[in-house]
Image: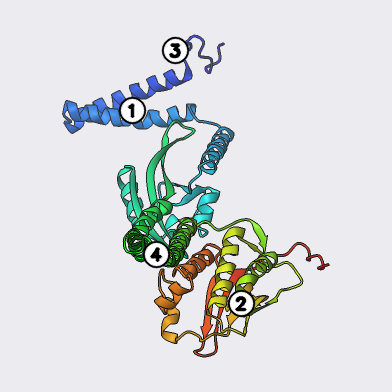
Amino acid sequence: MADRSDHSSSPFAAWPDRLRRSALVLFTAAVALAALAMFANLSPIHALLAFASVVGGALVPWQLHDAAVPLDVLTEHDTNRTAVAQALIAGMPDPAVLLDRAGRVMHFNAAAAQFAPALREGEPVQFALRAPEILTLLRKTLTDATERRTTYLDRGPLERWMELVVAPVPMPTALGGVDRHLLMTFHDLTPLRRVEEMRADFVANASHELRTPLAAVTGFIDTLLGPARDDPEARERFLGIMRAQAGRMARLIDDLLSLSRVELRTHLRPETVIDLVPIVRQVCDGLEPLARDRDLAVEVELPDVPATILGDREEVLRLVENLVENALKYGASGNCVEVRLSAEASPEGAPEWQIAVRDHGRGIAPEHLPRLTERFYRIDAGDSRALGGTGLGLSLVKHILNRHRGRLLIDSTLGQGATFTACFPRQQAAAPHPAPK
């Protein structure tokens, strides 16, 4: 006697399991809906819609069950997708952040971590980036999945102009679907903005400052070509003045170019380890002739260990040179200029190297102190020009310190001289200086 469970004699035995189940569902649904239409007076259209709903609801779970992807395949797909996303984000030169559809941080690269240190994976991006322009752009892009961009001013420790691009990124899933993510990229426009600002400043300042020496040179040339054509004594005197005016213009242009170069790189902190001790010694030795001409002595106090910082050697050399040269120019003759390099602490307790330059001149009135680092600001314009000053020295010092994340302290009392102190964040020294021979 044949087993009742043996379907070999059934005409449906050769059908696949999925087809047999589907046929059974269709037959059962047709019979049930025919009876329902008969007793409930359903119209043909409503009966057809009900039939489609029942069949769809019954078949979909079976289809998904048959097409189910093993858990290890899903896990491997997610792992591979994460690795690819991380590699792409890490390879981008600009700060880049990948968000999920809820605005949570999924991945970000090293540039983004430096740009926004508060970024954390799994947290909403607005915890780290709070600029209204960023939040508005994100909200709109999350709503309609349209790429957008904006330019905004990042008011951090250093002001930076940034361009933000937010673009939807489709990410394939293991089941053949697509997840919608957002990619945020930031581009630093600060150098371009600074170039525009510096060009405008250069034209305005240079035209103003160069007008006087150019007018003087032109007047002397006219005099030499006219009334003083045959006067050797006047010619010698005028040529000397013209040479001095030409030197003044050359110094002015040199200071303007130096200031422009420093301003261009203000947002880029130097990464080279340098030692302040040989820099201070080199500057003081090089300015000995000026000290003798001004009847001044230079007293230098240096530490016995390296004073290392992260810095640009040429810029720091220019900074120390400006401070010491100013002290020699405005110090009282017959006295001394004191240059001291020492290890101190900032008001917050951070270790610093401080270069203090003190003169014993006539001092600076309190109302002038806040404006000393402005471009072309002079307490006595005539005195400054007579001493060869351009009005840019302390402005250059301030910008160099800004780039090195340092600070400038100015202390002065009328009749008792002035002290200018440049403070640099300290870097751990590697080895002591060799003893002088």
Real-space Cα separation, disc 2 to disc 3, in angstroms:
100 Å
Q: Nearer the viewer, residue 426 or 411?
A: 411
User: Can you tell which mark lies on residue 356?
Assistant: 2
Residue 65 on image: x %, y % = 48, 30
Residue 306 on image: x %, y % = 73, 66
User: Can you tell which mark lies on residue 55?
Assistant: 1
Residue 109 on image: x %, y % = 53, 48
Which comes sooner in the sequence, label 1 or label 2? 1
> What residue lies at 56% left-to-right and 72% top-to-bottom?
325
Residue 122 on image: x %, y % = 50, 53
Real-space Cα separation, disc 1 to disc 4, in angstroms:
117 Å
Q: Nearer the viewer, mark 2 or mark 3?
A: 2
Left or right? Give the position of 412 relative to 344: left
Mark 1–mark 4 contact, CB under 8 Å? no
Q: Amino acid at mark 2?
A: Ala
Residue picked out by circle 4: 231
Q: Amino acid at mark 3?
A: Phe
Q: Where is the C terminus found, in terms of image quarters?
A: bottom right
Q: Where is the N terminus found, in terms of image quarters?
A: top right
Which comes sooner in the sequence, label 4 or label 2? 4
Mark 4–mark 2 contact, CB under 8 Å? no
Q: Nearer the viewer, mark 1 or mark 2?
A: 2
Mark 1–mark 2 contact, CB under 8 Å? no
Q: Secondary structure at mark 2?
A: strand
Q: Amino acid at mark 1?
A: Val
Q: Nearer the viewer, mark 1 or mark 4?
A: 4
